[in-house]
Amino acid sequence: MYNAEKVIPFIIVLIVFFTIPMWLNFGRLEAIPQPELPKKEKKCIESKEYMRAYHMKLLDNWRKKAIRENQHVYVASDGKTHTISLQRTCMKCHTNKEKFCDKCHDFVITHPDCWDCHIAPEVAKKWQ
Amino acid sequence: MAIKRRDFLKLTGLTLLGTAASAAVGDLLTRGEVKAQEYTSPPEALKGKRWAMVIDVKKCKEGQKKGCGKKCIEVCHYLHNVPSIPDKKKEIKWIWEDKFEHAFPEQADEYLKEVFKDVPFLLLCNQCDDPPCVRVCPTQATFKREDGIVMMDFHRCIGCRFCMAACPFGARSFNWFDPRPYVKKVNPEYPTRMKGVVEKCMFCYERLAQGKIPACVEACPANALIFGDLADENSEVSKILKERIAIRRKAELGTHPSVFYLID
């Protein structure tokens, strides 16, 4: 390799530069988002792990079933039934979008457009 | 160019490997999903084959004389967060009122016009049996449900407005801007719409799922609106249509509207 004594250090500098955010936050626990969980309910409609990983898929299926197939009730894996509605079911327990949804969504810089139409509880409160 | 036996075997091996790998990756992506999911319709939901509405215009006129204050429009627009936009060119309406000659332009016979001079005609989406809006929608954002309701899936609407051009009744409105500032009193149970989508009456599908009749029908103090299943011989709407004279808007276009106006 030509100019190895220049090229290799420069590659190392580049790697360090691009991973700066990782090193700066290394081991810092406060960087991990802490969404506020409902105080009254202990369990969501499915397990915590499932909801964490697949809530977006679940919500998308809810939309398809309720609007396109006229199936307005979800039977969870524990047999309990829930009305399919973001505003009338989810947000009755998760009463604050900013303290729950936005915590993680902001952290991973994702911008779901649910709230362009659906009304967050805190927004509805201010509106009245 | 002939392929060598050696290259052929190599390619075959690679293809097999690729197939196996993609199957494994697919498994990884769906791992942990709960399989035992079911969807049903609630037991209290109203079920029908072809929902229809009959509007008794004379009762409506009497009701307005007694001062009903157009409760049907008020309740509908409150429940569905329909904005009140003063600009007529950009207004949004789900249910509204117009004169006979505007609702039935092809029948604007001058003597009929005289008969219906002060009679209000409530207009809304006709929930056509053969809806032209559904035929032109490029994304299937609007579609006909099995119970006859012409639905809107706002999530899929791209705002092309083909449906508005196709609808002969002007039943669809377009959101030229964010409608939220024009919603004075909000119903927190129902969403609003956003800039760039088309909206219209959907026969209160969300209330039917809860076992309730449409809000306008329930709100009318004069009982001028009647809701029911046209496919059911014994429903109230079927019985009324057999006995009395009803007309539909622009029936000659063959869209088969499901909203009838009693004129006798």
Image: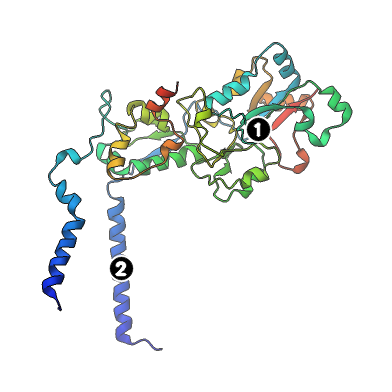
Is residue A69 visible in the rendered image? The answer is no
Element at label 1: loop
Tell whether A72 sits left or right of A44. Answer: right
Measuring from the top left, give residue A57's x and y in whole percent.
Answer: 37, 44
Name the residue tied to disc 1.
Answer: B88
Element at label 2: helix
Which kind of residue does numbered mark 2 sit on? Gly
Which kind of residue does numbered mark 1 sit on? Lys
Image quadrant in which the N terminus of chain B is located: bottom left
Image quadrant in which the C terminus of chain B is located: top right
Tell whether B205 sits left or right of B108. Answer: left
Confirm whether circles 1 and 2 share one chain: yes
Real-space Cα separation, disc 1 to disc 2, in angstroms: 60 Å
In the rendered picture of this protein, how many numbered marks are placed on residues?
2
Tell whether B21 sits left or right of B210. Answer: left
What residue appears at the point 58 percent right and 27 percent down from the top-left corner? B84
Upstream in sequence: badge 1 or badge 2: 2
- Closer-to-camera residue (B260/B74): B74
- Closer-to-camera residue (B99/B240): B99
Q: Residue furthest top?
A: B66
Name the residue tied to disc 2.
Answer: B18
Measuring from the top left, give residue B188's x and y in whole percent.
Answer: 45, 25
Q: Chain of mark 1?
A: B
A23 vs B256: above or below:
below
